[in-house]
Amino acid sequence: MKLETKTLGATLAIIIKGQITGISEVQEIKNIVESYRDTSSIELILEDAYVMPSSLIGYLVKLVNVDEKRIIINAQEDLKELLLDLSLEKTFILK
């Protein structure tokens, strides 16, 4: 997995290339989000991922429900279908 970050106004864009396979990679994403805690919106651009670890999904749900962040997930159809199956289309903005 390779990560790249960009800020676009109040939005933090995290570009993720490759699969998110382990807890250390999830922690790396969490650390990036924490270092940009003043942003109100986070866009995850998942270029090659077709799954997302449950620990990352739980963390993103917490960001929406507790920290009141707006989460945009820009992903391939397989991953969007997974998030729809989990009824998360009202929690996240899916692109």
Image: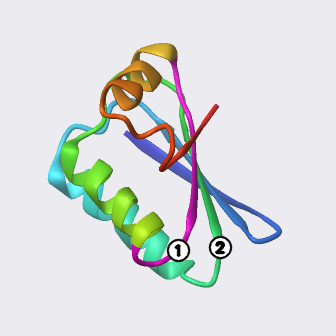
Which of the 4 quarters of the picture holds residue 50? Answer: top left
Report the magenta residues as a range.
Answer: 66-76
Residue placed under numbered mark 2 in the picture: 40
Going from N to C along the chain, the mark reached first, 2 or 1, is 2
Mark 2 to mark 1: distance in Å? 8 Å
Element class at badge 1 = loop
Q: Is residue 83 magenta?
A: no
Q: Where, quadrant-wise, is the N terminus in this rendering?
A: top left
Seen as rendered, the residue at the extreme top is 77
**Residue 67 rendering spot, x and y as whole percentages:** 46, 78
Residue placed under numbered mark 1 in the picture: 68
**For residue 7, side relative to residue 17 (left or right):** right
Q: Is residue 45 visible?
A: yes
Three-letter amino acid code at the position of disc 1: Glu
Tag 2 and tag 1, C-beta contact below 8 Å: yes
Element class at badge 2 = loop
**Residue 10 rendering spot, x and y as whole percentages:** 76, 71
